[in-house]
Amino acid sequence: MKRFSFLLSAVLLSVLSMPSIAQNSNVRQISNTNENQPYKVIYKDIKAGKSDYSKIILNAWKLYDNNRLDDIAMIIADTVTAFLPDGTVIKGKGNFLTGLKAYRGDFSSVVSTVSAITTLKADNIPNQEATTIWGTETAIKKDGTTQKMNIHELWFFNKDGMVITFYQYAMPILSK
């Protein structure tokens, strides 16, 4: 047993004292400049943003599911612009909330599941952060039919923490 402990200690010591080949300290993130790229990239050098914004959007989804849409108003800027899947563009907080309430009013219940959420920040646009969320919405219409959608949303926050731009992409999930 002593020999095994000594051998194990010697092996561990030699492994721990070896330089790491896989980790190179000279690695740096490459900037996504427009040089030699087929498209102009608007948001450059994207990094993780404030995780609080992700939590705010998760709460907004829960408020939508629970039909408590007035509670969402506090995160929406007066000048919000929303782009919806059917091509509709809504401008202004009042119009956004009215449209949201009208759409949600068509359903007796909504249950959402979240696949992923993250907040991103681009170095070249310092006054904005974008929270992106992917999920599935299962809604029961008032006539009893079910509507199931894959949802992808982008919520852009300004420097004051208010949503200034909203994009929603949706794809129906067809039953087999």
Image: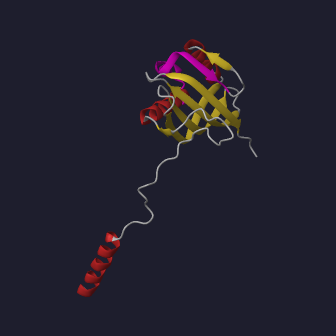
Read off the magenta span: 65-84
Q: At 70% across and 21% down in the image, what residue appears?
A: 88
Q: How are the colours assigned in the image?
A: secondary structure
Q: Is residue 67 left or right of residue 170?
A: left
How many numbered marks does the figure carry? 0
Residue 100 in picture, x, y percent from top left: 60, 21
The answer to which of 39 and 83 lies nearer the viewer is 39
Determine the image quadrant of residue 139.
Answer: top right
Q: Residue furthest left?
A: 2
Q: Residue furthest right?
A: 176
Residue 147 can be seen, yes or no:
no
Q: Position of residue 47 (x, y in %)?
A: 48, 39
Q: Based on the displayed image, in which of its 4 quarters is residue 144 positioned? A: top right
Q: Is residue 60 magenta?
A: no
Pick the front one: 11 or 51: 11
Rendered position, 52 above or below 23: above
Depth check: 165 or 137 in front?
A: 165
| Left or right of 23 on screen, residue 41 | right
